[in-house]
Every structure is written in C-alpha cells, then in structure tokens.
Amino acid sequence: MTTAPANNADKAPEDRILGTLPVWDLTDLYPGNDSPELNADLDRVAKDAAAFSGSYKGKLSGLSGKALGAAIAEYEAIDEIMGRIMSYAQLVYAGNVSDPDVGRFYQTMQERVNDISAHVLFFALELNEIDDKVLAKQLKAAESGRYKPWVDDARLFRPHQLDEEIERLLHDKRVAGRSAWNRLFDETMADMRFDHEGGKITSEEVMNMLSNPDEGVRKKASETLGQELQKHARTFSLITNTLAKDKEIEDKWRHFARPESSRNLANKVEDEVVDALNKAVQGAYPTLSHRYYAMKAKWFGKEQLDHWDRNAPLPDADNSIIPWAQATETVLTAYGDFSTDLAEIGKQFFDNAWIDAPVREGKSSGAFAHPTVPSAHPYLLLNYQGKTRDVMTLAHELGHGCHQVLAAPQGNLMADTPLTLAETASVFGEMLTFRRMLRSQDDPAKRKVMLAGKVEDMLNTVVRQIAFFNFELRVHTARREGELTAEDICDIWMGVQTESLGPAIRFDDNYRWYWTYIPHFIHSPFYVYAYAFGDCLVNSLYAVYEQAENGFADKYLDMLRAGGTLRHTELLAPFGLDASDPAFWQKGISVVSGLIDELEAMD
C-alpha cells in the first residue's frame, strides 16, 4: 500500500499518534497522466463513439429488440471508458487542487471527453422519442429488457427534453460554463491560507479547530475563518449568482417550475415526498435542535452558546487522538458484527490502496467516496485528524464504498443509486459503528458524552442539511428577481440558521460568511436534503433491524446490490417501510428526539 509519511520525526506529535495514514494508488485506473494506457483509451473511445453515431443515429425506432439491446450495450461500454477517464482525472485533481499542472490536466480531460461524448448524445434523446408501444415491444427481448430500469429512468426526462441541437449546445458549453465555475470555487478554496496566530493554515485545519476542547481556540478559529472568507466574498457571491442564474435559465427551457424539481426527478423522488420531509423536519426544530442546544448551553454553564461552541466537545469528553489503526478496527468490527460479508468488502479498502486519508496542502477538503466505474473499484477521500467525528466519517464513506462495490455487477448504466438512497449505506454504517461503541461503554458519564455526540451528528445531518436546503431554495428564488449582493445572501443564511438552530445559539458577524465554503451549493444544487432523507430512512430501517429476526442483513445487502434498478418504494417494501407516507418521516425524527429525551433523563 502507498502510505503518507505521517509518522516521520519532523511531524507534529498529534500526527505521530495518528500513525501511518494511507494514500490512494490510482494506477488501477491509469498508471499516470501521460500514460500510453490513458492515451490509448482516449483514442479508442473517440473512434468508437464516432462509429456508434454512424451506426445508430436516426435508426433506433426501427431496431429489433435484440438489436436495441446490442446498441445499449455498446453505448454502455463507451460510457464506461469515458467514466474511467474522468474518474481518474477527478481523483488526481482532488488530490492536489492547487497544482496548476493538475488543473490543466483535469480541464483538458473534461474538454476531450466532452467532445467525444457529443457523438453519443443523440442516443438517450432518440431513445426517448420512440413511441411507447414500439418501445414496449422492443423491451420484450432479453437483450434490451435487462436495461429496462435505465430506459425507464431516461424517459422520466421526456417532458423536459429539448431539441437535439439545443441539447448539443448545452452539452458543448458545459466545460466553459458550470464546470468552469465549479473549478474556480475549488481552486479558490484550495488556495486560501488562513492567517492564524502567526502562521498560515488550510481551511480544513481551521475548521478542525472549531471542535477543539479549548473555547479560546474555537473562538479564535471562528474569527479567522469568518474574516478570511469575507475577504473572498465577492468571488463567492459571483459564483453563487452565476450558477443560480444558469440554473434558472436551463430550468425555464426545460419547464421545471421549481428550483429543486430537476434534482428531485434525478433522485427518482416526487416533489411531494421531499416537501413532506422538509415540512416534518422544520416542524421538529423546537423539539430537536432548539431543545438540545438549550440543554448543551446549560451543560456549559451559559444561557446561550456562541456559535463556535455548537460542535464543542462536552466538558467530560475524551479528546484524545484516535490512531488510524484503532479507527480501522472499530469500523470493521462494527461492520462485521452486522455482516461478515459487509466487513470483508470493507476490508478491501484498507488492504489495498483505495483510501487517501492525510490532510495536506492543496488536497480537496471534506470527504467523499468516488464509485469510479464497475470494471474498477471505488476510492475514498478523507481528511483524517483523529477525532471521534473522523471515525464516524470513515464509517460513513466506507458505507458508500461498500454500496458501490455491491451495486457494481448491475453494470455501468444501472449501478448508480439516486442520491436519496445513496446515503442509506453510509448513514447505516455510521449507526452500526456508533451503536457498537456505545455498547462497549459502561461509564454513565462517557455514555452521555457519546449520546450527545451522536445527537449532534444527527442534528448536523437532519436539521442542518434541511436548513441548507431551505437556504438554497431562498437564494435561487430570490435570484430570479435579480442579482444578489453578498450581504443579501448573508441575510438569507442568517435567517435559516436562526430558525433551525434556535434561540440558544448566539451568532456574530463572522458567522454571516460561513455559507461561502460549502461545496454542495456549488457542485450539486439541492443535493443536501439527501442527507436528511438518508438519516431519517436509516433511523426507521435500524428500528426494523433491532426488532428483526435472522435474515435482515441478507435483505439489506440485496437492497444495496440493486443499485439504481429499483425506486425507493420497491427497495423499502421488504422492510415494511414507505417513504411516501408522511408518517414515515416522523418515525425517523422520533429516533433523534428519543435520544434527546434520554439525555434529558441523565441530568
């Protein structure tokens, strides 16, 4: 395994405690940026895409079912090669966003693949134009019928599809439009250095200080973060305004009435289901976040918590650094207690160089699991600093990775899961890890700290993400009336934060700028509600698990294996759950509320 020199003598003491942190090895995708293998794939897929267009354009409705199945299989193979190339480029870029040569390579790959994919753009468009009766007959053939879930999903967008020339224009302009603004955001964030106590640190390092046990450290970090973000407010506001306007224009052309509707359609979830989730969580603010933060303020001997105290460890918390080896054992043991099969899949990520864990300059902040393509394997990016939350992040991203491995046999077109269900395995992995850690703790004071930590994670996942969702709704709605100033966006941000976190949290002017660093708003508009969807879903699912007899784990793994072939109603039916029922969300919320009840009873 390739590893980072995290235990070298010149490293800080806390880094030496972490142990040797893994760094991913991307050669399973390509040996290098200028490798013959990468160049050969670029040449081959360009020829294949052009030939595919010549063979099938304008002919789909007249194909037999068997021939249509062969055409889809060819399309899938071409798409997978392009996916492999772009996965590699994205991972290289995430590893060092600040390097101009890496940025140039990433942009070049985007442009090359964008040009190649233009040859096959017609395929999904023309497939959607086939008459329903003709297509139904074609899909009776085994060769095409196996792709029916993918065809059905593609045809969901029929009412929003534009003429091919317009679709081609939008496709070609993407690299100079939304993708370019995304890159500007990433590189701005990666290049930022925060002046802090005589030194310069990264955004990841300063945000890590916000959960430091020392209030003075937290307060200073919050000031450093807000002041530096404010310096770049003009850039972040321009990016936000431009992308919101870009989305509004495309939504008008595609006849999406609401800013979030295109995301909901892509997630295969009805607007009404998302509305029910949003309404349920907002209605629960007083019994969830408002109640908990008032209780936490009392624990800290205050009437109100300053915003830099929101994620502060409790006074009795164990703030010792958790070595990587211990985190690995904790997560894999928790997975193994549930399913040895799941643990064996997870172990592959540690036995091979599939994880990039160290914090380093230029590296993308946060954490993610990238599925790459079914013929390869997923990769995990972390910024591991040894906190309990970092262990939970590892459990979360490993859940994604295991899900992606299990779904891979569905093939390149049907392995991907809608975002709402993509969060199921990750949040479930977190829950397994937390519950195991809680079971092993007998000390009442330490159990209280653990419960409080879990409640805070749930509030960050459910309440905070729904607040983020409503922030986006308000920004995109207001942007339709004209460009927003940085202060306008700050006012919207403070409005949703005050509503969601409640009167026990006190804000200052530095906090007004915290919206600027959240990448989901830029890369994936309206993604964020998927976290709340997944958390509430997993809360209900875990309750079924606790009451279930043998066989739950097998059904759970089958659900993950389905990938994108089934909708949420079909996937949850074996567990007796229905996300379209408004009461479903109350069940998930009641789990969080119940943990807060438990904490109140400990006082």
Image (cartoon, rainbow, N blue to C red):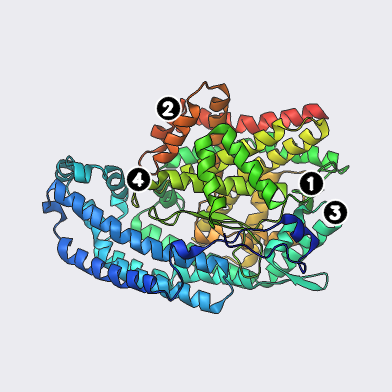
Residue at point 77%, 33% (across, down):
447
Q: Earlier in the sequence, mark 4 or mark 2?
A: 4
Residue at point 49%, 40% (across, down):
275
SS for tag 1? loop
Instruction: Judge the density around disc 2: few (<14), some (14-19), many (≥20) Cα neighbours within 10 Å.
Output: few
Q: How far is the residue under mark 3 from the one under mark 1?
A: 9 Å
Q: Are marks 3 and 2 in contact (CB under 8 Å)?
A: no
Kindly identify which numbered label has been placed on residue 214: 3
Under mark 1, the amino acid is Pro
Where 266 falls versus 222 (above or below)? above
Under mark 2, the amino acid is Pro
Q: Which of marks 1 and 4 is nearer the N terminus?
A: 1
**In front: label 1 or label 4:** 4
Residue at point 72%, 55% (across, down):
18
Under mark 3, the amino acid is Asp
| Tag 1 residue | 313
Kindly identify which numbered label has been placed on residue 574: 2
SS for tag 4? helix
Instruction: Judge the density around disc 4: few (<14), some (14-19), many (≥20) Cα neighbours within 10 Å.
Output: some
Can the viewer see residue 423 in this picture?
Answer: no
Which one is in front, 320 or 302?
320
SS for tag 2? helix
